[in-house]
Image: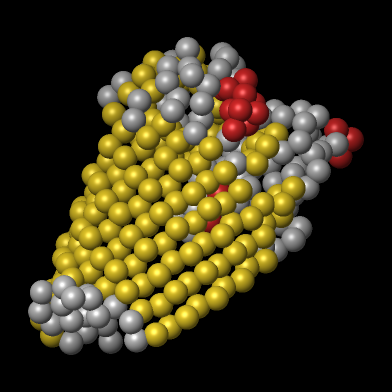
Amino acid sequence: MYNTNNFIVAPGNSSFLNAQYGVASYTFLGNSYGGNQIPDIVGNLRLDQAWGSLHFGAAMHAITPGFYAGNEATGHPDTAYGFAVNGAFELKNLPTGAGDSLKVEATYAQGAAKYAFNGGTHDTQGGGRYAKFSGDTLAFGYALDGVFGRNGQIEQSTAWSIAAFYEHYWNPAWRTSLFGSYSSISYGSAGNALLSAAFSQAGGRLGSANAQNPTGASAGYLQNTTGNFDFAIAQIGTRTAWTPVKNLTLSAEFTYSRLEQNLGGQYVGNVSGKPAGQTYQLQNQNLYNGSVQILRSF
């Protein structure tokens, strides 16, 4: 969650790498949670059969805000409550071959974005910050539970995701999988207005931090933007694995990712390793990843 009166780490800023960003739970620049007052309440149901399985889950998430400004005297928004629901199924014994399987999962969340983005790691790994530079272009976005401004209430985000995984065994030693996912988040008109007001001005709240100034300083701003901070991440990939002997697997994987944003315009900012105050055009970005793994089990 983000209080637009405070700084949040800017795209490409070195704060992403230092001790002021995501070292431990809730330490990242821009976090405006008032602590973990109520643990998430999570329930799951599962049915396993020879043909496959069915899964259903739900979670309640308390959004406990910090103060509007630096102390208790400034007040704070009311605690809000978000939720997430999840459904999935797995099909086995497919006609395509012995051992083949298909898995599909979908999630919807309101005020609980981490359930739809990467399985709940945001509290310790940077508050759901995504950014990709390519030359003088940039795409970026934040997966936040919600936003609030001074003397206002929390505007919760809505997020959803869908993912699928298919694995085919060519023979007992060789198998190939195909997988893909799509995750999207929206802030609504009120949430977008708060973010736009915070970021679209020189000296705005896109910031940096260091040990001498842990609360942040302005590092960039947006100009000529559409004011729409909704964004999505699409991924598709494949993996082929070979198990020549028991407990030894060699595999190669390739993944294509695309960051799709609705935010047009330019970002003017100080990016680590580049000239200060450079202007970047906001546009969608592509990312390609590949890896090779040798896994030996004992």
Seen in the picture, residue 229 relative to 109 is either above or below; the reply is: above
**Residue 34 in view:** no
The tally of labels here is: 0
Q: At x 45% / y 58%, what residue is drawn? A: 106
Seen in the picture, residue 153 relative to 89 is either above or below; the reply is: above
The front one of 33 and 108 is: 108
**Residue reaching furthest right?**
73
Quarter where residue 190 is shown: top right
**Residue 236 in view:** yes
Q: At x 10% / y 74%, what residue is drawn? A: 170
x, y percent for residue 201 = 57, 14
Seen in the picture, residue 8 relative to 226 is either above or below; the reply is: below
How does the figure colour the protein chain or chains?
secondary structure
Q: Quadrant of the C terminus?
A: bottom left
The front one of 70 and 223 is: 223
Q: Quadrant of the N terminus?
A: top right
The front one of 89 and 113 is: 89
x, y percent for residue 84 = 59, 57
x, y percent for residue 151 = 80, 29
Q: At x 58% / y 22%, what residue is drawn? A: 196
Quarter where residue 258 is shown: top left
Quarter where residue 78 is shown: top right
Is 2 on the left-hand or right-hand side of 108? right
x, y percent for residue 50 = 34, 86
Q: At x 33% / y 23%, what residue is drawn? A: 137
